[in-house]
Image (spheres, rainbow, N blue to C red):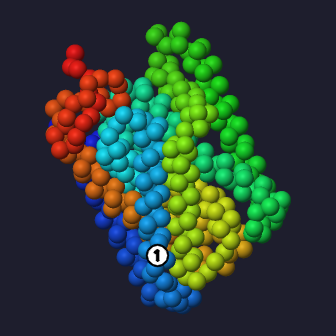
Amino acid sequence: MRKRGDAPDAVSPDRLRRALVKLGAFIVVAIFVVTLLPGLGGLRSQFAQARPAWIAVGCALEMLSALSYVLAFRIVFCTRMSWRTSYKIAMAEEGADSLLPVGGAGGLALGAWALRRGGMPASEIAHKSVAFFLLTSVANVATLVLLGAGLATRVLPGYAGVPLAVVPAAVAAGAIVATLAVGRLTRRIETRMKSKAERSRFTRIVPTLRATTDGINEAVRLLRQGEPLLLIGLVGYMLFDVLVLWASFRALGFAPELTIVWIAYLIGQLGNLIPLPGGIGGVELGLIGTLVLYGVPVVPATAAVLIYRVIELWIPAAFGLIAFVQLRALLRREPDPIDLCEPGEVVEIAAQGPEIAEPAT
């Protein structure tokens, strides 16, 4: 029987620990292959001349990216949560996304579990999760449009042929339009099904449609409000991660235009959708292939991507696992759910300071 405060099986501590061990084993194997396999002399030479100072800069930038995620998470889900609680939930999500082969769903599942244990209604968690997913994607999509337009018109530095600049921008713009259209469509479908739901097989579909619609509307509302901290969190989450890849090139003494690194990053990260732990394999191939497509030589591109991926996976994984252990201990200590985001009394939580709690009914 699962104990109070235990996470669901999909994001259980044992599974996260096994994933961390697998990630470490994969990196060891990769180092062994690069070190000993014939024909990789150029790659070994690149690693031999890597400058540790730039790698340290990359690690610091990755931490700033993770902290930006925490900031955006808190603004979207609940500004009444303590910063410590926000950090533990959001950083644990980051760790789960780095370790679990679920294309980002592991982090959302872990966050949903923690918020539900904290007293937030399931319907609110559902639509805020949709909104948060969209908002963390919107910076990437909007930037892809701007970069593509800027490279195509030569306003931005860096060379990319017109097709390589225009096509990604057009696809990204189409994704924005399609998302808004989905919001309207799901609202209409939900309205039609609602009257039939109680006596039909569509009963379970209606809440999903409602969460999708409300989530899209919530994301649009938050963007229209222009909350500075939310915008800083969303942009910082993406920008600092891009700069980790840029710093990885600098560590090797190679300096492609930031705009080229940026647009290749946005396209190559689609490999993260492949259901592999941390997107391992898919992201590397996506990033290297896209960088080469945009004119970056294959050897420095491969070396920089491998350095970037070690930093991008290990920083969130290590800090996320610590945050998850702390979060689980917090939830186990509390005998009653804490309403983190509903009006209520301020109560003192052992070793945690003030939290918002509803009176028991």
**Residue beneath the point at 42% across and 25% down:** 123
Query: Badge 1: few (under 14), some or many (20 or more) residues near its Cα, within 10 Å?
Result: many
Image quadrant where residue 4 sits: top left
Q: Tell me residue 240's x, y (percent).
A: 52, 60
Query: In this image, 117 relative to 165: left or right?
Result: left
Quadrant occupied by the N terminus: top left
Of 72 and 38, the residue lying toward us: 72
Residue under the point 44% across and 43% down: 73
Using residue 287 as the reference point, say whether residue 94 is left or right of it: left
Instruction: Give the image location of residue 255, x and y in percent.
Output: 64, 77
Q: Which residue is mark 1?
A: 55
Give whichever of 9, 83 is nearer the camera: 83
Q: Is residue 205 visible?
A: no
Which element type, helix, strand or loop, lies under badge 1? helix
**Of the residues shown, which amino acid type is indicated by label 1?**
Ile
Hey, which quadrant is residue 289 in on the image?
Answer: bottom right
Q: Which of the two residues, 317 or 349, is positioned nearer the viewer here?
A: 349
Say which quadrant the C terminus sits in.
Answer: top left
**Residue 281 appears at what percent x and percent y?**
51, 65
Which picture quadrant has residue 221?
top right
Residue 254 in the image: above or below residue 333: below
Q: Is residue 285 shown above or below 80?
A: below
Instruction: Tell how many labels.
Output: 1
On the rendered structure, is 98 left or right of 211? left
Residue visible at 64% across and 31% down in the picture? 182
Q: Position of residue 40 (x, y in %)?
A: 54, 87
Residue 211 in view:
yes
The answer to whether residue 252 is above or below residue 12 is below
